[in-house]
Image (cartoon, rainbow, N blue to C red):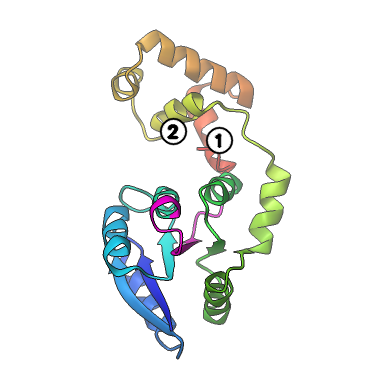
Amino acid sequence: MIRILLADDEQLIRDAIAGLLELEDDFEVVARAASGSEALSAARSLHPDIALLDLQMPAPDGIEVARTLASEKPDCRCIIVTSHGRPGYLKSALAAGVRGFVPKTVPAAVLAQVVRTVAAGGRHVDPQLAAEAISAGDSPLTPREADVLALARDGASVDEIAGRVSLSRGTVRNYLSAAATKLGAVNRHEAARIASEHGWI
């Protein structure tokens, strides 16, 4: 029996995926979590074989949960199931130890097979996402540039960004300017849009 932890902040999707998985004779959904913190707590106490994680959910996100579990619970293999299949996310997920990466549009039968493949020690990356990741290339942004640009994308002002990352306003402006230059953008808002589209933030 493959014991599964399912984490997604949207209850309808969480319940629908759980219902589909429980139709399989060899699956048992042992926990359902609505946030990254709930997922980690459940994984630590229930020791599932597989953690099916939404990419974007209340902190920590799916990639951070996978990174923590790879360190603390290496026997719990992680699969990201997401509607945000951008190349940068895929690369970050694989670097964090994720063993599977599939879109939420995947048929239930395919998802079940991915779970079995990963539980048996294999890997699965959606072919379309893999092709897009290869063609997108690596991010030109430094980690700090990506951090401040992500905050700018979310609408934070320079003052707010400076406070949240403990940098001076001038340093934040320099990072934003460097990011915009690297991405060929006219301002930080366009730079954030470009970086988001490539999955770099």
The residue that appears at 54% across and 64% down in the rendered structure is 103
Q: Quadrant of residue 42?
A: bottom left
What count of labels does the image hold?
2
The amino acid type, in three-letter code, at marker 2 is Ala
The residue that appears at 35% across and 70% down in the rendered structure is 14
Residue 185 part of the magenta-drawn span: no
Residue 186 seen by the camera: no
Residue 28 % position (x, y): 38, 82
Find numbered disc 1 in the image and state the secondary structure of the residue it sits on.
helix
The residue stretch that appears in magenta: 70-85
Give the residue number, with chain letter if any, for mark 2.
150
Q: Nearer the viewer, residue 181 or 32?
A: 32
Q: Quadrant of residue 39?
A: bottom left
Residue 190 % position (x, y): 53, 29
The amino acid type, in three-letter code, at marker 1 is Ala
**Sequence-earlier tag: 2 or 1:** 2
Give the residue number, with chain letter if any, for mark 1.
195
